[in-house]
Image (cartoon, rainbow, N blue to C red):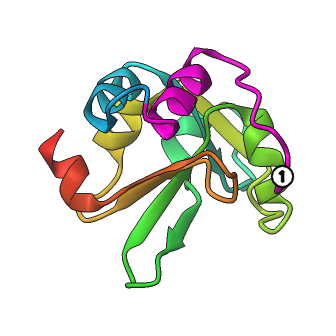
């Protein structure tokens, strides 16, 4: 997605772009993000018939340069496609509120919104703990 113009495809992406361009504070963006829907890639594992997939969801967890575990989420499924080419086992995903992602992930994890995309947002574990 390098060298492409970031065209917002939904409300979250409009707000992300506004924050990215300095038209919205990071704090205001975080408040919007908390009530927004995000796409969380999950590992495609064979689930027994009748089992609820979300109960067994294994999200894509990356490791930052300093060793921090980071959960990857995207502002839309389309934003995930180019990045996930390098992670073929993660061909499924959940559309869910960002607040739900925070409630389910472990303490000490960060979040990367739109990793690999020019317009993204990284959240350190300390920042998420304040939410």
Q: Is residue 69 left or right of residue 103?
A: right
Residue at (80% x, 35% y) in the render: 78
Residue 130 falls left or right of residue 84: left
In the foreground, 97 or 113: 113
| Circle 1 SS class | loop
Q: Is residue 51 visible?
A: no
Question: In this view, which residue lies farthest toward the left?
Answer: 130
Q: What residue sits 50% from the left and 39% below the top?
A: 20
| In this picture, residue 2 sits left or right of residue 73 | right
Label 1 sits on residue: 1
Magenta-highlighted residues: 1-22
Residue 58 coordinates in the image, percent (x, y)? 56, 55
- Could you tell me which residue is drawn at 46 percent across and 21 percent down? 36
Total tally of numbered discs in the picture = 1
Answer with the quarter of the image where residue 67 lies: bottom left
Q: State the residue at coordinates (51%, 27%).
A: 18
Q: Nearer the viewer, residue 22 or 66?
A: 22
């Amino acid at each position: 997605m390098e060298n492409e113009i970031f065209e917002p495809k939904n409300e979250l992406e409009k707000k992300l772009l506004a924050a990215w361009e300095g038209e919205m504070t990071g704090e205001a963006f975080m408040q919007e993000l908390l009530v927004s829907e995000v796409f969380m890639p999950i590992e495609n594992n064979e689930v027994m018939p009748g089992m609820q997939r979300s109960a067994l969801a294994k999200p894509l967890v990356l490791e930052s340069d300093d060793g921090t575990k980071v959960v990857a989420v995207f502002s839309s499924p389309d934003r995930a496609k180019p990045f996930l080419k390098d992670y073929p086992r993660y061909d499924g995903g959940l559309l869910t509120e960002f607040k739900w992602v925070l409630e389910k992930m472990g303490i000490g994890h960060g979040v990367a919104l739109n990793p690999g995309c020019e317009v993204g947002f990284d959240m350190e574990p300390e920042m998420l703990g304040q939410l």
